[in-house]
Image (cartoon, grey):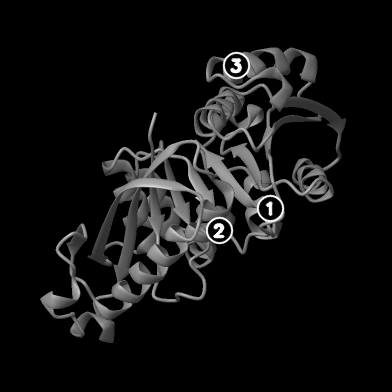
C-alpha cells in the first residue's frame, strides 16, 4: 500500500532534514506519495515576492502562493528526491500563510489530509519540543485541546546516513501496540532495515515476555518475517536514558515511541504528558524519532 507523508519544508534550504531523512531511509521497494508543506508568515518580505506564473511549470502540482522561499525549498527538495533511491509516484506542494502558529497549522493540515505521518525537520521540531516541555502553558494547552491528534509525527534532526534499522519501544500500553502497528505498516517493504522491540523493565511490573508475543504478531500481520525481528528487555533506572543508550550503541536510524505510556493510560493523562518523549526529543541526535499517539 502506498505511504502518504506530509513533509514540512522551510526557506532554509541547507536544512530540509525531513526530506533528507526520507531520501536516506527509504529504498525503491515501496511507493510513496509526498505533500510538501511550506508555511510563510504574513509579515514576511517573502510574501510580497510572489513569483511570476512562468516560474511554475505546468506539470508541477502546487497549491497556494508560490513565493521565493517556497520555490527555493521546492527545488532543493526535488533535487534531493531525484538523487535518492526512494520511489515517489506523486508529489503535491502546498504553500500557506501562517494562521494559528506553525505547529498548530502543521497538525491541522496533518489531520485534514489523512497522512500516514507528519515529517518535521529540525526547526519545526524545536517548536514542538517547546509544547512537550511546557504542557501547562496556556498556548500549548489550547493546541492540545483543539487538535484531534491521531497522526504519527516523525521528528528528524540532522540524520547520520550510516545508521539503519528501527528501535520500537514497548511497555504493554495500547499506545505502544499502535506504535508497533505503525512501524509494521511503514516497514513492510523495507527489507534492508530490521526491527528491534525494546522493553525497559520498571515499576509497572510487566515483563517483556508478556509484551513481545503480541507485538511480534502485529509485525507479522504486515508481512514482516521473523528474521527481521529482534527482542531486547533490560532494566533501566531512567526509561529515556536507557532508550538513548541502546539507540546510540547500535546506531539505529529510528526510535519509535508512543506518546502515552502504560502509566499515563492507567491514570488517563493527556498525550503530551510523558517525560520520556520530551527527553528523547531534546537529547536524541543522528536518528529520527517516530512519535505515535
Tags 2 and 1 touching, CB below 8 Å: no
Q: Quadrant of residue 260?
A: top right
Q: Residue 275: x and y, percent?
A: 66, 46
Q: State left or right for residue 136 relative to residue 73.
A: right
The answer to which of 253 and 141 lies nearer the viewer is 253
Q: Residue 118: x and y, percent?
A: 43, 48
Q: Residue at x 57, y 35 (%)?
A: 190
Looking at the image, is 210 positioned above or below residue 160?
Answer: above
Q: State left or right for residue 34 relative to residue 291.
A: left
Q: Looking at the image, is mark 3 or mark 1 nearer the viewer?
A: 3
**Residue that badge 1 annotates:** 279
Q: Earlier in the sequence, mark 3 or mark 1?
A: 3
Q: Earlier in the sequence, mark 2 or mark 1?
A: 2
Mark-to-mark CA distance, 3 and 2: 33 Å
Q: Residue at x 60, y 48 (%)?
A: 289
Q: Residues within 10 Å of mark 1 (few under 14, many from 20)?
A: some
Task: Classify mark 3: helix, strand or loop.
Answer: helix
Q: Residue 113: x and y, percent?
A: 28, 42
The answer to which of 141 and 257 lies nearer the viewer is 257
**Residue that badge 2 annotates:** 129
Q: Residues within 10 Å of mark 3 (few under 14, many from 20)?
A: some
**Residue that badge 3 annotates:** 220
Task: Classify mark 1: helix, strand or loop.
Answer: helix
Mark-to-mark CA distance, 3 and 1: 31 Å
The answer to which of 82 and 202 lies nearer the viewer is 82
The answer to which of 73 and 258 lies nearer the viewer is 73
Mark-to-mark CA distance, 2 and 1: 9 Å
Q: Looking at the image, is mark 3 or mark 2 nearer the viewer?
A: 3
Q: Residue at x 32, y 77 (%)?
A: 69
Q: Residue 145: x and y, percent?
A: 37, 44
Amino acid at each position: 500500500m502506498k505511504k502518504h507523508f506530509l513533509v514540512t519544508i522551510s526557506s532554509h534550504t541547507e536544512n530540509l532534514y525531513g526530506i533528507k531523512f526520507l531520501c536516506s531511509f527509504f529504498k525503491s521497494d515501496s511507493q510513496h506519495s509526498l505533500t510538501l508543506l511550506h508555511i510563510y508568515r504574513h509579515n514576511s518580505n517573502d510574501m510580497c515576492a510572489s513569483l511570476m506564473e512562468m516560474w511554475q511549470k505546468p506539470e508541477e502540482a502546487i497549491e497556494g502562493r508560490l513565493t521565493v522561499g517556497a520555490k527555493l525549498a521546492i527545488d532543493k527538495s526535488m533535487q534531493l528526491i531525484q538523487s535518492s533511491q526512494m520511489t515517489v509516484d506523486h508529489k503535491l506542494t502546498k504553500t500557506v500563510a501562517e494562521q494559528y502558529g506553525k505547529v498548530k497549522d502543521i497538525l491541522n493540515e496533518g489531520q485534514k489530509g489523512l497522512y500516514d505521518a507528519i515529517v518535521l525537520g529540525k526547526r519545526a521540531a524545536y517548536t514542538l519540543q517547546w509544547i512537550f516541555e511546557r504542557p501547562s502553558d496556556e498556548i500549548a494547552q489550547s493546541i492540545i485541546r483543539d487538535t484531534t491528534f491521531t497522526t504519527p509525527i516523525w521528528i528528524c534532526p540532522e540524520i547520520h546516513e550510516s545508521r539503519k534499522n528501527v528501535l520500537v519501544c514497548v511497555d504493554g500500553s495500547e499506545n505502544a501496540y499502535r506504535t508497533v502497528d505503525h512501524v509494521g505498516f511503514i516497514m513492510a517493504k523495507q527489507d534492508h532495515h530490521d526491527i528491534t522491540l525494546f522493553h525497559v523493565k520498571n515499576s509497572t511490573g510487566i515483563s517483556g515476555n508478556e509484551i513481545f508475543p503480541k507485538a511480534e504478531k502485529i509485525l507479522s500481520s504486515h508481512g514482516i518475517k521473523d528474521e527481521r525481528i529482534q527482542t531486547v528487555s533490560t532494566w533501566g533506572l531512567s526509561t529515556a536514558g536507557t532508550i538513548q543508550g541502546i539507540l546510540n550503541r547500535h546506531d539505529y536510524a529510528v526510535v519509535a515511541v508512543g506518546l502515552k505510556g502504560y502509566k499515563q493510560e492507567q491514570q488517563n493523562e493527556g498525550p503530551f504528558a510523558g517525560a520520556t518523549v520530551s527527553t528523547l526529543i531534546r537529547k536524541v541526535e543522528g536518528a529520527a524519532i517516530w512519535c505515535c499517539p
